[in-house]
Amino acid sequence: MPHDAAPSRPGPRPRRLLAAFRRLSIRNKLLAMVLLPLLVVLPLLGVILLAWVNLAFDRLLITKIRADLAVAEGYFDRVLGEVGASTAAVADSHALHLALATATPGGDAAVVPLLERFRQRERLDFINLRGADGRLRATDQGPTGFDDSGWPQVVPDAAPGGRTSVEVLGPQQLAVLGPRHAERAGVPLLATRNARPSERSHEARSMVLLATRPVTAPDGRLLGHVQGGVLLNRNLPLIDHINEIVYPQGSLPFGSQGTATLFLDDVRISTNVRLFGGVAEERAIGTRVSQTVREAVLEQGSTWLGRAFVVNDWYVSAYKPLADSAGQRVGMLYVGYLEAPFRVLKYGVLGGIGVVFFAVMIAAAVVSLRLAREIFSPIERMDATMRRIEGGALDARVGPVDSQDEIGRLATHLDEVLATLQRWHAQLDAKVAERTQQLEDTQARLVRSEKMATIGQLTASIAHEVNNPIAVIQGNLDLLRTLLPPPVADEVRAELALIDQQIERMRLIVTQLLQFARPGEFAGYVERVDPRRLLEDCLLLVSHQLATTRIQVERALAPVPPVAINRQELQQVLVNLLVNAVHAMPEGGTLGLSSRTDEDGRVALAICDTGPGLPPELIGQLFRPFVTRKKDGTGLGLWISRGIVERYGGDIQAGNREDGLRGARFVVVLPADADARPEAAA
């Protein structure tokens, strides 16, 4: 039995609270009903919104730094490729082949001026000539007899076409290149806050972009190898150009500053980060990365995206490990921008939202209290009037009431009843003086009964007025459609539709309140989009380009279900594909648009042109950054478009047309909205 009785123990507490609520005056009840949501629910919603805005803002900063790192990494790979291309140009040059063919034993000195000329032409820091056996024969500084042990060796079997990689050279290897490179490579280490403790005081090694290409005779005989490279230590033009590409002038708002850095191990060897004092000419070369970042990037091999302390301030940072040809992590590529302006902005936004919520709460409380006073003030006046009458003041009246609702009419009726009762009392006073006491008792009971009946009627009327308006409006609207003859119904169809829209708007307001209260159950930025209609809208956006060409548009838009996506982002993707198709047909052609549902139930939107089509070697690289055939293109459009579509679970497919016509074909595949009704696809 004790186990059976245990669940009922919490029961008395709610009953006591309910009993205490019942004992409150109507004023206090109304105040509790008005202020409880304002003082509890609204602040809770405000806290939830502030937390969500804070999280969304931080994610936005991380998304931006991820994109910045991708741009910097793409340009770094491009520079690496240019070093390889320059080295290959030297290896394939006729002048070098002729010099090697005519060189006498021990006559490598004749090749040195040629190597120096090639180095200046290709804008390399050094060029080495190695024999077919891989031994160093000469550099652009002259013939060499130095010991080149420790240099990245030529491995013909492993890389017959040559190799381009990031490498680290020690002082002995740098000595082969001449004194100017050794002096430039040396970096004194500076004490840096949060860096791992180290006893080193100087970094004598150098990081280089090194390319090796074979030199072959027309008969295929290996004549030697050419090694070309770019020194990264103190390479300020390179790092400044990376920073200019990632953070062009005016790209960062609120006074934030973008920075880029190359690290050898954890030491900054080339950077535009300024030193502690902020002197414009003094860069933070020789400072080191924090121990936390070092462990995550260099030791664990992961990419760092987030806040990091850089020299003397906090930055939104991205660190990418750099590996040499052996796969060893030897350094890092860094981009980042000053966090302080964005932090001030975030706190300003959060503070603004807090102030708005507080102001709304205060304003709502004031308005609610005034509205609540319109309810309880007449009732309190009626109660006071009844108490005065009970005290013997038969001439007491409620008086004029501003409200014109049921409570106002009740006060007027009460005054009329009191006046009538007073008149009856005056007429009967002389005749039934002996029954005065009985009459007063009867009058008191009558007033109390009338009061209770009126309050009961008032409560029922309020419940009716609150719960039934929407159902009455909808019912009468449906009846009106049934009773109106067709000609009249056609004339007022727009008005009836407007009423339907307003009813739906009331339901939408409830839905929006639910969205506001439970943001985790609703997509904040996603809406249901009709793909066919959006494709037609996008066609209008490029109509001015179609008007200047002889391009015809062919549509094969089959019914498809809606998709759940951000409308503006999908429009950006489709407009980019349409513009690319128009550019592929400068002399005119046919632009094909089609929509269908594939075998997996996904929506497929196809855009075809009759241009030259896509070369096979380009199809696999289309969606990489900086890949483009346009002279003035950036090579980022398709890469960004695929990233947008993949974020919503979709994909972009590229290829050439398979219907016998020449041209390219791009297909945007998106999952159908899971909540879409089957008839919505029609």
Image (spheres, rainbow, N blue to C red):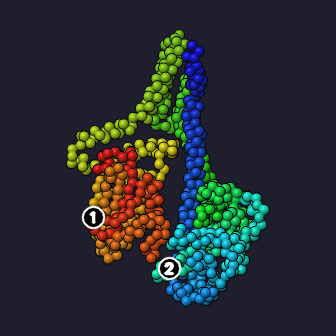
Q: Position of residue 181 (x, y in %)?
A: 69, 78
The residue lying at 57 percent from left, 13 percent from top is: 1
Q: Which residue is mark 1?
A: 659
Q: Secondary structure at mark 1?
A: loop
Decide if residue 296 is on the left or right side of residue 535.
right
The residue lying at 34 percent from left, 61 percent from top is: 606
The residue lying at 58 percent from left, 69 percent from top is: 165
Query: Foreground residue, 384 or 644?
Result: 644
Q: CA distance from mark 2 to mark 1?
A: 48 Å
Q: Secondary structure at mark 2?
A: loop
Badge 2 amino acid: Arg
Q: Position of residue 288 (x, y in %)?
A: 71, 63
Q: Which residue is mark 2?
A: 221
Mark 2 and mark 1 lie on one chain; the one further toward the N terminus is: 2
Q: Which mark is residue 171?
A: none
Can the viewer see residue 538 in this picture?
no
